[in-house]
């Protein structure tokens, strides 16, 4: 009898975490490595949020809480959805978990049966297909195109829906491409979804606040209120509030689904960390102006990286609306040879040779289900980014 379960054998360790670990190891061994692989802001958690956590400890907020979140945090989330998205939820329609990842995991474990299909636009965040597979569901990746800025088109969505489709997982702004859908683009997709009442929508709005050039963020249930009863709107404090380590994510949706997610959580991790919940209350209710200041820096970095990568031989880099990623295509370099004689046969080889030759860690596009391309996270110092882009230019220029 095998020790490892069939469910676990269906999934792989996160490749983005693996590459970040490899870069960290090389650095520890003395190599000059610039890691552009991690999906987290390089900014500190704001002080008012840290202070709220310290106060929570001093006030003795150190015990088990309600499994799916303290009332104060649920109230802050209800207010956030109203204020920022025009969505009205009751506290009983809100659940809080240990990061957005747990909320997503819970939602899929709570709803998927063997054979259920989940539509996932590609390139996608690495965890979506693995979690679906863990649940015995069938991921249905739908490949988007660079010419469309990696956005799903209504006809592609329509063609992917079958009677077995349970969920569409939607992620705007996107990890890994940074692409975000305008209201019109979103409406074209929600029109398709209105024709298929059996399909549920899991929208991952984790990068909501990270949009540039006055781009207006929208979420599906806001654009099409007719989808409210079958949409789980997921969000969290990890990215915009620079709180990746605190592990607080949340979602709102129909009560029955929220209750099922809570039941699952009650038998696994119980409540998310009590202190981090109080910090999240302050994040959502407190001043939001640091987000504007951070976004100014992110926008400058995005513009720098897009411009420098488009000057590299053989790379094409679209300019995305949000998040802190760019997703350049390296199709123009496939088949070329490095000075050491290695043929660049795919994007994984491109990324490993780039790391070897120039000490720049990026994540190959095939990890996200669409290559040949790679993902750069520009959530790192502007100085390092500039140096990394120069090295990438040198590496691409060295290929023959
Ligand atoms: C698209 C997307 N969704 C969800 C998450 C998970 O966020 P959290 O750190 O809150 O679990 C991430 C983190 O990388 C992400 O990129």
Image (spheres, helix red, strand yellow):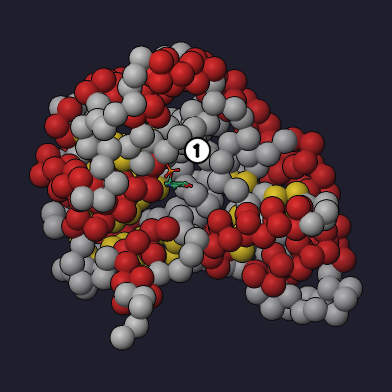
Query: Does residue 195 lie above or below 115 as drawn?
Result: above
Q: How many marks?
A: 1
Q: Residue at x 75, y 61 (%)?
A: 355
Confirm or reject: label 1 Cβ below 8 Å from ligand 1.
Answer: no
Which residue is at the far bottom?
1
> In this orientation, does residue 272 appear?
yes
Q: Residue 246: where, in percent of width, then height?
A: 45, 34
Q: Residue at x 76, y 68 (%)?
A: 353
Residue 285: give x, y in percent of width and height: 37, 16
Image-based side of 206 in relation to 109, left or right: right
* Near-viewer residue (235 or 313): 235
Residue receiving disc 1? 245
Element at label 1:
loop
Residue 181 visible in rendering: no
The spot of residue 370 in percent (x, y) is: 52, 66
Ligand 1 - quadrant of the structure image: top left
Q: Residues within 10 Å of mark 1 (few under 14, many from 20)?
A: few
* Left or right of 138, for residue 292: right
Question: Can you tell which quarter of the image residue 7 is in?
Answer: bottom left
Q: Quadrant of the N terminus?
A: bottom left
Q: Quadrant of residue 335?
A: bottom right
- Residue for point 36% across, 23% down: 278
Q: Establish if 270 lies above or below 310.
A: above
In this rendering, position of residue 81 left or right of residue 181 = left
- Between 97 and 218, the residue placed more toward the observer is 97
Q: Quadrant of the C terminus?
A: bottom right
178 or 90: nearer the viewer: 90
At horizontal 63% and vertical 56% (from top left) the residue drawn is: 21
Q: Is residue 384 above or below residue 62?
A: below
Residue 175 rendering spot, x and y as whole percentages: 49, 49
For residue 300, side relative to residue 15 (left or right): right
């Amino acid at each position: 009898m095998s020790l490892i379960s069939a469910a676990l054998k269906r999934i792989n360790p996160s490749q983005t975490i693996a590459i970040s670990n490899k870069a960290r190891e090389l650095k520890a061994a003395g190599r000059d490595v610039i890691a552009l692989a991690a999906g987290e802001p390089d900014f500190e958690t704001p002080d008012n949020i840290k202070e709220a956590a310290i106060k929570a400890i001093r006030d003795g907020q150190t015990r088990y809480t309600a499994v799916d979140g303290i009332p104060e945090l649920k109230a802050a989330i209800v207010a956030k959805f109203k204020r920022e998205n025009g969505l009205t939820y009751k506290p009983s329609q809100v659940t809080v978990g240990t990061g957005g990842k747990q909320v997503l995991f819970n939602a899929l474990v709570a709803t998927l049966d063997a054979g259920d299909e989940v539509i996932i636009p590609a390139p996608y965040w690495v965890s979506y297909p693995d979690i679906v597979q863990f649940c015995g569901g069938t991921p249905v990746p739908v490949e988007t195109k660079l010419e469309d800025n990696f956005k799903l088109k209504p006809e592609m969505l329509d063609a992917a829906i079958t009677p077995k489709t349970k969920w569409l997982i939607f992620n705007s702004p996107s990890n890994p491409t940074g692409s975000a859908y305008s209201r019109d683009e979103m409406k074209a997709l929600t029109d398709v979804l209105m024709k298929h009442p059996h399909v549920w929508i899991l929208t991952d709005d984790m990068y909501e606040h990270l949009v540039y050039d006055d781009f207006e963020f929208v979420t599906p249930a806001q654009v099409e209120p007719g989808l409210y009863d079958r949409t789980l709107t997921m969000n969290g404090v990890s990215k915009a509030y620079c709180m990746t380590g605190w592990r607080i994510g949340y979602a709102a949706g129909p009560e029955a689904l929220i209750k099922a997610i809570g039941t699952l959580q009650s038998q696994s991790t119980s409540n998310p960390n009590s202190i981090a919940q109080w910090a999240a209350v302050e994040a959502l209710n407190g001043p939001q102006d640091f987000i504007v200041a951070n976004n100014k820096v992110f926008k400058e970095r995005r513009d720098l990286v897009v411009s420098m990568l488009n000057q590299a031989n053989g790379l094409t880099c679209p300019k995305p609306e949000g998040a802190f990623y760019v997703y350049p295509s390296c199709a123009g370099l496939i088949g070329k040879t490095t000075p050491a004689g290695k043929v660049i046969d795919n994007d994984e080889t491109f990324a490993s040779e780039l790391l070897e030759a120039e000490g720049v860690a990026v994540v190959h596009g095939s990890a996200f289900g669409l290559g040949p391309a790679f993902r750069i996270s520009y959530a790192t110092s502007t100085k390092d980014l500039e140096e990394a882009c120069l090295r990438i230019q040198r590496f691409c220029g060295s290929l023959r």
